[in-house]
Amino acid sequence: MAQNNHNTEVIYGLYDDEEDLLHAVKTAKNSHLEIHDVFSPFPVHGLDPILGLEESRLHQAGFIYGALGMLTAFLGMTWIFTKDWPNIFGGKPYWSVPAFIPITFEMTVLFSAIGMTVTFYIINGLGPGVVNKHLDDRITDDKFCIAFDKSQVSVENAEAFFKSTGASEVNSKTI
């Protein structure tokens, strides 16, 4: 759906409610209209399956980052307490696995959180200094949007579609 074409002319309709947006997306899919992208100020439950988007693999990356954090903590403490600084604390042995559990857990969570955040920003082209093109300022506030590529659909068909599905406003823009 979302295409990263530069200088794409789109015609888009703004909706006031997420239920109207879901109905419009279903109507577009049933009418075999090629949707360029859909924008909303918050995640809309049920939109991904209608658009045919596959599940994110970010949770798999989170598992890998968590496993890396767990290994880093466990192996780091093993090396520190058995080779680098072997002290007996309160009668515990050098290699006391139960004492490693809290730090191992915290490092697992830390690596997962930071790794998934950085991965999310890289995949989505976000970060400091990045200027993203946007259709309308209200999309990040209280409006929902469906955009069609003008080269894929005629302006008359798009305007008729937006009118029939209850769009509050129809505009066009080059992004």
Image: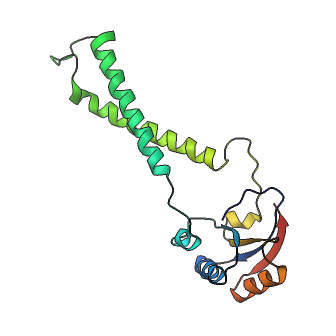
Q: Indicate the quadrant containing the C terminus: top left, top right, bottom left or bottom right.
A: bottom right
Between residue 119 and residue 98, name the one nearer to us.
119
Image spot of residue 99 (x, y percent): 24, 27
Vertical arrangement, residue 30 with respect to residue 72, above or below: below
Vertical arrangement, residue 53 with respect to residue 79, above or below: below
Q: Using the rendered view, name the quadrant where residue 8 is placed.
A: bottom right
Q: Residue at x 54, y 44 (%)?
A: 117
Q: Residue at x 37, y 36 (%)?
A: 106
Image spot of residue 48 (x, y percent): 55, 68
Image spot of residue 22 (x, y percent): 59, 78
Q: How many marks?
A: 0
Vertical arrangement, residue 107 with respect to residue 87, above or below: below
Instruction: Report the residue that reaches farthest toward the left.
Output: 91
In the image, 3: left or right of 56?
Answer: right
Vertical arrangement, residue 101 with respect to residue 9, above or below: above
In the image, 113: left or right of 37?
Answer: left
Q: Using the rendered view, name the quadrant where residue 79 is placed.
A: top left
Is there any visible trace of residue 85 in the rendered image? Answer: no
Image spot of residue 111 (x, y percent): 45, 36
Q: Using the rendered view, name the quadrant where residue 96 is placed.
A: top left
Q: Residue at x 70, y 73 (%)?
A: 34
Is there any visible trace of residue 127 in the rendered image? Answer: yes
Q: Residue at x 45, y 48 (%)?
A: 60
Q: Indicate the quadrant containing the N terminus: top left, top right, bottom left or bottom right.
A: bottom right
* Coloring applied to the structure: rainbow
Instruction: Report the residue that reaches farthest toward the bottom.
Output: 164
In the image, 132: left or right of 18?
Answer: right
